[in-house]
Amino acid sequence: MSEVWDLAELAATPDLEQELDRLARSHDIIRTRQLNQQETWTVLGAALTRQLLSDPRLSNDVHTHAPHGALVPGMSVMLLEQDDPDHSRYRRLVTAAFASRAVRELEPRIVATTRRLLDDLGDSGTADFVGAFTYPMPLEVICDLLGVPDEEREPFRKWAMDISAAPSAEAMQTAAAELFAYCVRLIGAKRRQPTEDLLSELIAARFEDGTALTDEELSSFAAVLLIAGHDTVTNLLANALYDLLTHPEQLAALRRDASLVGDAVEEALRFRGSAMTTVNRVALEDIEAGGVTIRKGELVRFLLNAANRDEELRADPHTFDIRRATMQHVAFGMGPHFCLGQRLARQEATIALTEILDRFPTLELAVPEDKVRWLASDAIRGLEELPLRYAR
């Protein structure tokens, strides 16, 4: 296979899903070029995705086996870039913290944040919902979750923007390094004075042998929570609104029956998931898969949006239907690295859609569908902006 596809170039068009479908009909795996120009094997098919996501011959520990393939080269190893036994040990500790009171009682704050941002829009008008709502809402939730003081949140907004929409790999790494340095300072403050938040829970948590997470491990976790937890929800919300508004019969069904909101979130995840690809993995040995040979040391990632449109999972994969009998998808991955924050992402999306549709009986695109601009990203599927016209 000689052709190399540029995912960021494809993602900047509204036709990405159709192009992925065309590619998947003839290839289970393709070569793609990442933002930093390195080439990677990218898996498209649902069956091969399920097979390889749990294949121990593919390592998440790119820091050891292929440092150039790390999410943020040079940053400490993150949970999603670990292999067992370290991954399972670390994940058990973090999973327990996610079940803590600080997380369980987050819902009222999500509702309050959502309503405050919608109040700021007023009763009617036209606004970019990405800038006015889908971007700030999950960022506020992540800051609440980590216990970031209100007066220190503005830099978080800049780092999140620079990381999600950086024009180059170098700019993204600079923003990530600044975020990591801040997290180190934040952890120091919480060691001195703990509060009721996830970061304080993790500082107090202990492994079976009585040891605790280091500042470096805690900072890496906080950084990846912002990177992964903010971007994915921002674009999930925008994509869900876009797909509901461009499928008016589905929007009408949801307005008639608000109990369908959970199903609408699942269909949005399947139909146009925001986490377009996984982080890189590295082959620990030569692997024959999908009609190609993945050589030892080569990078592999999974194009989840392509797998979710595979006819093997769904007979009519290109139909947006919130009333499906089953919502089978791999939007949160699968296997040992199944997304730890999937419950929170679903919670945020469900609350946001419920509040928006309840608040605005009139809601429509403020520009023609073909004028909506898509992000040029090789990892995230989302909109640069979502101009909407709304009224109470």
Image (cartoon, rainbow, N blue to C red):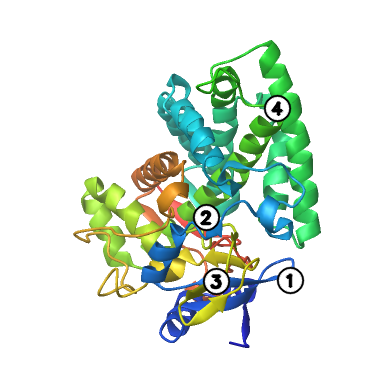
Q: Between marks 1 and 3, how big is the CA–CA gap?
A: 14 Å
Front position in the image: 116 or 87: 87
Question: Looking at the image, is mark 1 or mark 4 nearer the viewer?
Answer: 4
Q: Within 10 Å of the Cα at label 3, are there few (<14), some (14-19), or many (20+) other Cα atoms?
A: many
First in sequence, mark 4 or 2: give its number: 4
Q: Within 10 Å of the Cα at label 2, are there few (<14), some (14-19), or many (20+) other Cα atoms?
A: many
Q: Which mark is residue 235?
A: 2
* Residue 3 falls in image quadrant: bottom right
Q: Which mark is residue 42?
A: 3
Q: Amino acid at mark 3?
A: Thr
* Residue 252 falls in image quadrant: bottom left
Badge 2 vs badge 1, beta-carbon distance below 8 Å: no
In this rendering, position of residue 227 left or right of residue 245: right
Q: Within 10 Å of the Cα at label 1, are there few (<14), some (14-19), or many (20+) other Cα atoms?
A: few
Residue corresponding to mark 4: 215
Is disc 3 placed on a helix, strand or loop?
A: strand
> Residue 152 placed where, x, y %?
72, 28
Q: Residue at x 22, y 61 (%)?
A: 324
Is disc 2 placed on a helix, strand or loop?
A: helix
Q: Amino acid at mark 2?
A: Asn
Q: Between marks 4 and 2, how big is the CA–CA gap?
A: 30 Å
Q: Within 10 Å of the Cα at label 4, are there few (<14), some (14-19), or many (20+) other Cα atoms?
A: some
Front position in the image: 121 or 350: 350
Question: Looking at the image, is mark 2 or mark 1 nearer the viewer?
Answer: 1
From this view, report whether residue 130 is shown above or below residue 168. Answer: above
Q: Between marks 3 and 4, how big is the CA–CA gap?
A: 34 Å
Q: Between marks 1 and 4, how big is the CA–CA gap?
A: 32 Å
Question: Looking at the image, is mark 4 or mark 2 nearer the viewer?
Answer: 4
Q: Which mark is residue 37?
A: 1
Q: Amino acid at mark 4?
A: Asp
First in sequence, mark 3 or 4: give its number: 3
First in sequence, mark 1 or 4: give its number: 1
